[in-house]
Image (cartoon, grey):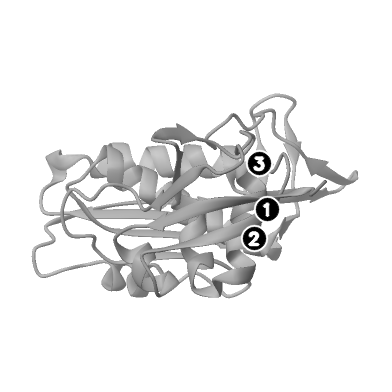
Amino acid sequence: MSDRMKVKLLFFASLKERAGAPGAEMDLPDGARVADLKARLAQVYPRLSEALPTLIVAVNHQFVFDGDSIPEGAEVALFPPVSGGAVGPTIYRVTEDALDLDDLLAQITLPSTGAACIFSGMVRGKTGRGEPHETAALEYEAYVPMAEEKMAQVAAEIRSRWPSVEGIAIVQRIGRLEVGTPTVLIACTAGHRDTGVFEAARYGIDRLKEIVPVWKKEIGPNGEIWIEGHYQPQKGD
C-alpha cells in the first residue's frame, strides 16, 4: 500500500510564469498539509520561493491554510493576492548596515508621490514605561530568511488594506546598536496624505512586532536580558 498521493497543481498569474507551466502533478506524503506543499514547491520550483510568503492556496475551490490537510487527488490552485492595480516599489530587508532614511525614501518615491509617512524606532537610553531603568545598548537578532519573507507578507497586507499606497519600505537592523541609533524603519508613500499612509505605516510596525521573527537583548548597568513579546501567531499569519 502506497504512502504517497498525487495532487493536481494549477498556477495562475505571475506564479504560472515562475513555475514555467500552467499546471503540474505533484507527489506528496499521505496526510500532507499545506505547509508541506509549500516546502515541496520551494524545492521543485525555486523561482516560487520569493512568492511563498503571500501565496494563496485553494483546495477544491476552498481557501486553505498551512495547517490544513490536503486530500488525495485534490485540485490545488496557487495564486498571488488578487490585484487591484499597479504595485509600487517595495523594499524589505534585515541588515547590519546603518539606515539611510533619505535613500530609502527616494527608492519608494514615484513621480506621482505627494506624501510619505515614516516611522523609525530607536534605542532608548532611559525607559519610563513599566519599571524605569537605563539601557546602554540593544542587541538585535533575527531569523533572517523567515523575517524577510514575513516582511514581504506585511507589505502585501498593507497593499490589500490601503490600495492607494505607492511605495513601502520595511527595514530592520540587527547586531549591537547604541543609544540613539535607529533600529527599524517603516515607510509608506502615496499621492496624498489622506489616502492611508499614516494608518499603513502604523499597521506596518504593529504587524512587524507580531509576526516578524526579530528579538532584542537589553544591555544595561545591571546586566543583560532578552525582551520577549506576548503575541502568538494565528492561522493566516
Report the amino acid beneath label 3.
Arg
Residue 211 position, x and y percent, is: 59, 42
Mark 3 burial class by Cα count in 10 Å: few <14, some 14-19, many 20+ = some
Among the two numbered marks 1 and 2 on one chain, the one whose residue lies closer to the N terminus? 1
Residue 134 position, x and y percent, is: 75, 42
- Distance from the alpha carbon under mark 3 to that under mark 2: 11 Å
Residues 3 and 59: in front is: 3
Among the two numbered marks 3 and 1 on one chain, the one whose residue lies closer to the N terminus? 1
Report the amino acid beneath label 2.
Arg
Q: Which residue is mark 2?
A: 40
Q: Please give the label number shown on residue 28.
A: 1
Among the two numbered marks 3 and 2 on one chain, the one whose residue lies closer to the N terminus? 3
Which type of secondary structure does the marked residue at label 1 adopt? strand
The residue shown at (76%, 54%) is: 136
In the figure, is residue 78 to the left or right of 162?
Answer: right
Which type of secondary structure does the marked residue at label 3 adopt? loop
Residue 94 position, x and y percent, is: 58, 65
The picture quadrant where one finds residue 26 is bottom right
Q: Please give the label number shown on residue 33.
A: 3
Q: Residue furthest right?
A: 223
